Image (spheres, rainbow, N blue to C red):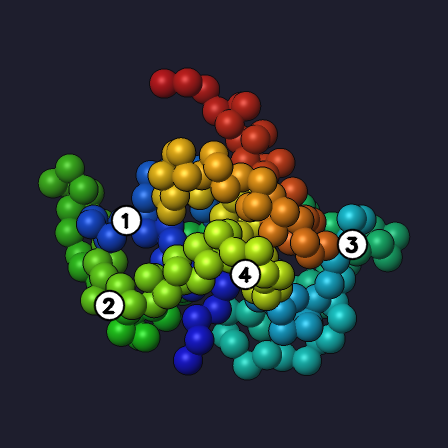
């Protein structure tokens, strides 16, 4: 069964060596996951966006127990004066539930036989759950697909454009590309990320939230 956008994104955030989320993914990972859930709903033609709003195009359940509760919430949204909320509002709102979403996605990746659960201790004191890789095949396939899009001139599939847009907006590209390669590829990455209106909308929302978080997070 093909992985969903949230599953693919979480694999890209995972540190293969430790089974933990990579530290570079920490600040924005919850908002990026929220964006990935919305992106998957859009790819299934359930929601759509424009610069001012995010709205339901088809309220029919997808059969996915992660996506359908979010779809129902958007469909039932009592937005002020009948105006739907925009992408940023939904990403911020869903991002507040990031821990629950991540736990559900990790459970799915364990059920797929891609990860395993390992209980341990952080600093020998605090309980910690890690997710070491069983099979890196799926992660390698996702990375290879994205590399193919970045280093070729073909028009990408909407799924790949959306995923690259979210990865870029959340500052996760350094987890995939070396610094000199990333710098050289940035024009193509920007082009791909901006191909789809939904990619621009979600990507801008995640990036704006990430920038604000960095601005107001005190230096240690």
Compute the Cα span from label 4 to label 2.
22 Å
- Disc 1: which residue: 15
Residue at 54% x, 23% y is: 215
Q: Is residue 47 left or right of residue 93?
A: right
Farthest residue, direction left: 124
Q: Residues within 10 Å of mark 1 (few under 14, many from 20)?
A: some
- Disc 4: which residue: 160
SS at mark 4 in the image: helix
* Quadrant (top left/top right/bottom left/bottom right) for the C terminus: top left
Compute the Cα span from label 3 to label 2.
38 Å
Please state the horizontal and vertical placement of residue 82, each as a whole percent of the image: 86, 57
Report the disc number at residue 135.
2
Question: Between disc 4 and disc 2, whose residue precedes?
Answer: 2
Question: Between disc 3 and disc 2, whose residue precedes?
Answer: 3
Q: 173 and 147: which one is in front?
A: 147
Q: Is residue 159 visible?
A: yes
Q: Residues within 10 Å of mark 3 (few under 14, many from 20)?
A: few
Q: Is residue 169 left or right of residue 86?
A: left
Mark nearest the camera among 1 and 4 is 4
Question: Between disc 4 and disc 3, whose residue precedes?
Answer: 3
- Disc 3: which residue: 50
The answer to the question of whether label 4 and label 2 lie on touching residues, with beta carbons closer than 8 A, is no
Compute the Cα span from label 2 to label 1.
14 Å
Please state the horizontal and vertical placement of residue 8, each as a whole percent of the image: 43, 62
Residue at 69% x, 63% y is: 74
The answer to the question of whether label 1 and label 4 lie on touching residues, with beta carbons closer than 8 A, is no
SS at mark 1 in the image: loop
Residue at 84% x, 54% y is: 83
Compute the Cα span from label 3 to label 1.
34 Å
Mark nearest the camera among 3 and 2 is 2
Mark nearest the camera among 4 and 2 is 4
């Amino acid at each position: 069964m093909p992985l969903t956008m949230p599953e693919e994104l979480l694999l890209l955030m995972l540190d293969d060596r430790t089974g933990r989320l990579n530290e570079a993914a920490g600040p924005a990972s919850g908002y990026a996951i929220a964006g990935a859930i919305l992106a998957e709903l859009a790819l299934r033609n359930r929601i759509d966006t424009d610069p001012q709003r995010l709205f339901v195009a088809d309220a029919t359940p997808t059969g996915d127990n992660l996506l359908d509760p979010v779809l129902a919430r958007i469909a039932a949204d009592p937005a002020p004066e009948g105006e739907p909320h925009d992408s940023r509002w939904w990403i911020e709102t869903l991002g507040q539930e990031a821990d629950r979403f991540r736990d559900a996605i990790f459970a799915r990746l364990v059920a797929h036989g891609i990860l395993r659960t390992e209980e341990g201790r952080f600093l020998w004191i605090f309980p910690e759950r890690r997710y070491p890789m069983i099979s890196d095949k799926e992660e390698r396939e996702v990375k290879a697909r994205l590399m193919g899009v970045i280093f070729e001139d073909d028009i990408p599939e909407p799924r790949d454009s959306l995923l690259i847009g979210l990865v870029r907006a959340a500052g996760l590209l350094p987890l995939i590309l070396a610094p000199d390669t990333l710098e050289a590829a940035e024009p193509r990455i920007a082009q791909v990320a901006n191909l789809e209106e939904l990619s621009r909308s979600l990507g801008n929302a995640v990036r704006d939230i990430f920038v604000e978080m960095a601005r107001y997070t005190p230096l240690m």
